[in-house]
Amino acid sequence: MVDERKRGRPTVIIIDDDKSVREALRGLFESVGLIAETHGSVAEFLAADDPDRAGCIVLDIRLPGQSGLEFQEELAKSRHPRSVVLISAHVDVAMAVRAMKAGAIDVLTKPVREQDLLEAVNRALASDNARREEATQTASLRLMYSKLTERERQIMSLVVEGKLNKQIAAEVQLAEATVKLHRGHMMRKMRALSVADLVRIAGILKL
């Protein structure tokens, strides 16, 4: 059950099989005003996780069962990617490269310097926030696009290609004045202020 006072606030999730490490990290994050929770394994975390919750994960690479590195790679490919900071007593170059390729914010060696970890977690929280804002914007644009008529979608596609009203009119076999009308409706529905803005929107929607 999520504490209502914490709902919406980002949470730093600590996954480490060493209880003393978990509690030390929880104390560190709470000392700077962050919400923190701890889990001893990936399985324990998954049993309690809300994938829509804002925050980041501080993840030990070597864990019983599924390793932290394997779990991070799995998260990166999932529908709910998370910002992850990996920690381990033993980090080799190959491991660090593998983690960074999967999108890790940082890979730190235990014992971790507190300032290094706090800076990495702040970057992870900022990354998570940016990703969520982007997802919200994309969902809003998809909704607006879904409300276009088929003709408006057709004209949007041609405008994004850089075609002029006269060229569009010839291609879709409509009067130029009619194209202008549809184009105006489409631009308003998509809240696009210019062709450049519309091209940006089309890129976000991968049209």
Image (tube, rainbow, N blue to C red):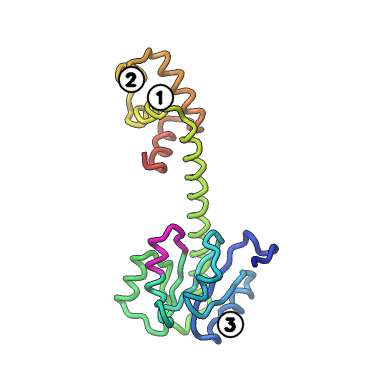
Q: Quadrant of residue 172?
A: top left
Question: Residue shown at 33%/76% (left/top)?
Answer: 95
Kind of residue at disc 1:
Arg
Single out the mark in the foreground, 3 or 1. Answer: 1
Residues drawn in magenta: 72-82
Question: Residue shown at 50%/70% (left/top)?
Answer: 46
Q: Secondary structure at mark 3?
A: helix
Give how far across and how far down residue 96 sits, in percent.
34, 74
Q: Pointers 3 and 1 in contact (CB under 8 A)?
A: no
Which sits earlier in the primary sequence, circle 2 or circle 1? 1
C-alpha gap between disc 2 and disc 3: 66 Å
- Placement of the C terminus among the 4 image quadrants: top left
C-alpha gap between disc 3 and disc 1: 59 Å
Q: Quadrant of residue 194?
A: top left
- Placement of the N terminus among the 4 image quadrants: bottom right
- Against 136, residue 19 (above or below) is below
Provide the residue designation for mark 1.
151
Single out the mark in the foreground, 2 or 3. Answer: 2
Neighbor class of circle 1 (other Cα within 10 Å; few <14, some 14-19, many 20+) is some
Residue toward you, 57 or 51: 51
Q: Secondary structure at mark 1?
A: helix
Which sits earlier in the primary sequence, circle 3 or circle 1? 3
Q: Pointers 2 and 1 in contact (CB under 8 A)?
A: yes
Provide the residue designation for mark 2.
172
- Against 205, residue 119 (above or below) is below
Provide the residue designation for mark 3.
23
Kind of residue at disc 2:
Val
Which sits earlier in the primary sequence, circle 2 or circle 3? 3
Q: Secondary structure at mark 2?
A: helix
